[in-house]
Image (cartoon, helix red, strand yellow):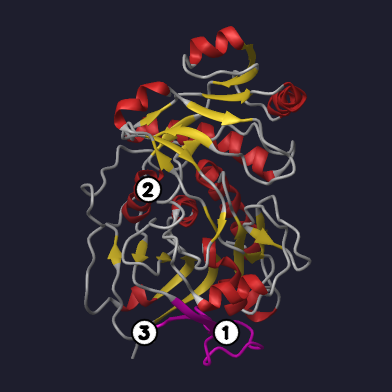
């Protein structure tokens, strides 16, 4: 007997028309409230799914949404270890809609960010989700920074970023009266949004199309069902068993993992490669006093230093009207360690045994200690590995790129699993 699972069930119905799969005006829970949860016995049909997505952050929810809108006849479930959705990386970021200027031309980051920004703006418009296209200045304050700034401008043009201009001191003052610099890139396509609100809207779309979200389901094991002979012609219809820390389980045909900070561990649980390994760094912000918020109108960034894999400390306006300054990058002693003294012995041991670059904000490292700069998607081999697609490294700008990433994942799932 499979224990009853705590789950969320969406109203079954046809996908609404639009792009992609329909952008209806969807509501969301009142601020501070989670999606309704139902406790108790579940119909037998909801113990098993054609496809399970592990991870209820913005990438996992976008992917589940894309899959069910493309394949409405399939049963699809999302497993999330917390009681609420989108509360970790999705709920702990600066909220910037990135334009795609920074990333290496022809890289997945560049392509998916430029495409994803357009999709996020369109989605928010059609759903009535508030956002601000407040723009961004990338400001050179030293003469030696100007060649890097000009090279960045050319990179942005190669990537197809809209509306870029190189501006001088006078125009900097017009855009940001309290900002001083020698030269800047004016990037009007950059914006801000509450990404958790976007993610919860993805969840609502998914549920309304017939999808299920199971919360409080922390994955502990991924294995083949014992009743499924791996060498039989057809095997069982749902040969993969996913078990949580409470002994509850679901079965499925295929798995897509979007586990964020735990992507390496979930891959290892499934018997796939644990590399690249996730190394967590915490970024802390300062907040301008309310009476000083008039000093900043839009995003203000420094010229990035190519020696470091992050964008530098910057000013970022928020949807609530506040202004954040940050982030720094400090080694976190726990993967979800949002406070300075949060500590996990296992997480810190995972960090200590890997060699990595010093003084940088590492997100994913390969087995040689090299920083992984692009998105990574892979699968495995064998009876389980052939049925799994892992999203291994999806750092910033993954939130901006989420709808574009989800389309690529849906394509890959369709091709890989012959849906």
Residue displayed at 53% across by 92% down: 226
Q: Is residue 387 visible?
A: no
Q: Are marks 2 and 3 in contact (CB under 8 Å)?
A: no
Q: Is residue 370 visible?
A: yes
Residue 361 percent coordinates (x, y): 62, 53
Mark with earlier residue (3, 1)? 1
Mark with earlier residue (2, 1)? 2
Q: Are marks 3 and 1 in contact (CB under 8 Å)?
A: no
Residue displayed at 48% across by 81% down: 220
Quickly name the residue at label 2: 196
Instruction: Quote the CA–CA distance across marks 3 and 1.
Output: 27 Å
Closer to the camera: disc 3 or disc 1? Answer: 3
**Magenta region, residue range:** 219-246
Q: Are marks 2 and 1 in contact (CB under 8 Å)?
A: no
Mark with earlier residue (2, 3)? 2
Instruction: Quote the CA–CA distance across marks 2 and 3.
Output: 27 Å
Secondary structure beneath dot 1 equals: loop
Quickly name the residue at label 1: 235
Residue 246 is labelled as: 3
Residue 44 is labelled as: none
Majority secondary structure in the magenta region: loop
**Is residue 225 located in the magenta-colored stretch of the structure?**
yes
Residue 23 percent coordinates (x, y): 38, 38
**Is residue 232 located in the magenta-colored stretch of the structure?**
yes
């Amino acid at each position: 007997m499979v224990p009853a699972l705590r789950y969320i069930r969406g109203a079954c119905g046809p996908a609404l028309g639009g792009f992609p799969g329909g952008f209806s005006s969807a509501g969301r829970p009142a601020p501070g409230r989670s999606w309704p949860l139902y406790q108790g016995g579940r119909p037998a049909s909801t113990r098993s799914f054609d496809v399970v997505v592990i991870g209820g952050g913005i990438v996992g929810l976008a992917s589940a949404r894309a899959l069910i809108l493309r394949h409405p006849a399939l049963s699809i479930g999302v497993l999330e270890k917390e009681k609420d959705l989108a509360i970790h990386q999705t709920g702990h970021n600066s909220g910037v809609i990135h334009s795609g200027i920074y990333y290496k031309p022809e890289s997945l980051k560049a392509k998916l960010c430029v495409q994803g920004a357009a999709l996020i703006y369109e989605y928010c418009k059609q759903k009535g989700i508030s956002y601000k296209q407040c723009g961004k200045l990338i400001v050179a304050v030293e003469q030696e920074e100007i060649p890097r700034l000009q090279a960045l401008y050319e990179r942005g043009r190669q990537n197809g970023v809209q509306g870029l201009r190189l501006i001088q001191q006078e125009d900097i003052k017009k855009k940001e009266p309290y900002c001083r610099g020698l030269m800047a890139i004016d990037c009007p396509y950059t914006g801000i949004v509450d990404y958790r609100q976007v993610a919860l809207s993805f969840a609502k779309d998914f549920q309304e199309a017939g999808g299920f979200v199971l919360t409080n389901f922390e994955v502990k094991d991924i294995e083949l069902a014992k009743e499924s002979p791996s060498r039989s012609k057809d095997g069982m219809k749902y040969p993969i068993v996913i078990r949580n820390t409470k002994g509850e389980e679901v079965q499925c045909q295929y798995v897509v993992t979007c586990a964020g900070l735990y992507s390496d561990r979930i891959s290892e649980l499934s018997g796939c490669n644990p590399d690249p390994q996730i190394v967590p760094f915490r970024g802390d912000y300062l907040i301008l006093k309310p009476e000083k918020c008039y000093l900043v109108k839009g995003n203000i960034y420094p010229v990035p230093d190519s020696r470091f894999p992050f964008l530098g400390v910057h000013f970022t306006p928020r949807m609530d009207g506040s202004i954040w300054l940050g982030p720094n990058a400090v080694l976190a002693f726990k993967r979800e360690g949002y406070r300075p003294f949060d500590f996990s012995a296992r997480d810190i041991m995972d960090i200590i045994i890997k060699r990595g670059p010093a003084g940088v904000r590492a997100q994913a490292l390969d087995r040689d200690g090299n920083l992984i700069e692009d998105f990574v998607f892979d699968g495995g081999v064998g009876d389980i590995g052939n049925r799994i697609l892992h999203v291994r490294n999806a750092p910033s700008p993954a939130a901006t790129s989420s709808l574009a990433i989800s389309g690529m994942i849906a394509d890959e799932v369709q091709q890989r699993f012959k849906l």
